[in-house]
């Protein structure tokens, strides 16, 4: 068996990105709870993405408070809590699996493969993870905000391998190309595959691997199965 393990990215891979409009709505709703201008909040929120992914803000409340303090605004506790609830609801919706995700993962599992996840994400994801149907099918989930490492740092891939008890050469890595994740996976010895779903907008600026990628590409998650079973 060439690939004993398949490791997936989360956003844009096992779950589709919510639309830009839904992201805008989330910002609108978060801002509605706070004494702050929408544009100032959006800029600060986008600017603190890296800190969220690296686990510097261990709660959404602390991220919002940091932004408010930087903008010299003093929100009431209830306002922060309302904005936090709106953000958590957005992420809950964003964690709905792709159409063919659960079936694909079930087939991999029933063939005896292990399944891993490596996600650059903020603290809402591990908070909500156990309530998602994906969590029961994934043997090891590595969240950047918990391990304080982000892709493409080799250590985050090696940590996933360590937890799964396998070597990188045994892994197929599947991702939509955010965070230079495919190059990072290749660097440690995994076999990377780009997923690019034709009906989705790939021009969101996050998928920095995708445009320059010349390696193996799939257009649906179920296409992972022949890659794994034909070897
Ligand atoms: Mg992604």
Image (spheres, rainbow, N blue to C red):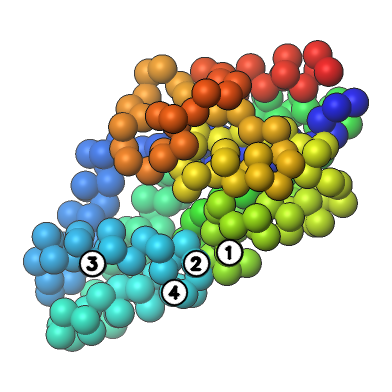
Mark toward the start of the polypeptide (4 vs 3):
3
Above/below status of 208 relative to 121:
above
Q: Could you give the CA–CA distance between mark 2 and mark 4, rounded to whole angstroms?
A: 8 Å
Q: Are marks 2 and 1 in contact (CB under 8 Å)?
A: yes
Near mark 4 (Cα within 10 A), the count class, few <14, some 14-19 or many ≥20, is many
Q: Do the residues under discs 4 and 3 have CB atoms within 8 angstroms?
A: no
Q: Quadrant of residue 156?
A: bottom right
Residue behind mark 4:
57
Residue where numbered disc 2 is placed: 54
The reply to whether callout 2 and callout 3 are in contact (CB within 8 Å) is no
Mark 1 CB within 8 Å of ligand 1: no
Is 28 left, or right, of 162 in this rendering? Answer: left
Q: Is mark 3 within 8 Å of ligand 1?
A: no
Residue identifier under label 1 = 149
| Residue at image coords 60%, 46% | 184
Does label 3 or label 1 sit earlier along the sequence?
3
């Amino acid at each position: 068996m060439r690939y004993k393990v398949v490791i997936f990215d989360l956003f844009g891979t096992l779950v589709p990105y919510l639309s830009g409009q839904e992201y805008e709505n989330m910002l609108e709703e978060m801002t509605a709870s706070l004494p702050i201008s929408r544009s100032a909040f959006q800029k600060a929120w986008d600017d603190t993405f890296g800190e969220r992914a690296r686990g510097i803000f261990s709660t959404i409340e602390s991220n919002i408070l940091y932004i408010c303090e930087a903008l010299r605004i003093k929100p009431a506790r209830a306002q922060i809590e309302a904005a936090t609830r709106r953000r958590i609801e957005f992420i809950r919706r964003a964690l709905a699996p792709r159409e063919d995700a659960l079936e694909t993962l079930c087939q991999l599992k029933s063939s005896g493969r292990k399944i891993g996840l490596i996600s650059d994400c903020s603290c809402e994801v591990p908070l909500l993870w156990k309530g998602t149907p994906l969590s029961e099918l994934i043997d090891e989930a590595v969240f950047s905000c918990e391990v304080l490492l982000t892709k493409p740092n080799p250590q985050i891939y090696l940590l996933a391998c360590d937890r799964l008890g396998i070597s990188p050469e045994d892994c197929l890595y599947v991702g939509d190309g955010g965070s230079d994740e495919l190059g990072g996976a290749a660097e440690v010895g995994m076999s990377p595959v780009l997923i690019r779903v034709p009906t989705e907008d790939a021009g969101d600026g996050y998928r920095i691997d995708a445009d320059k990628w010349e390696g193996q590409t799939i257009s649906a998650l179920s296409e992972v199965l022949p890659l794994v079973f034909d070897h």
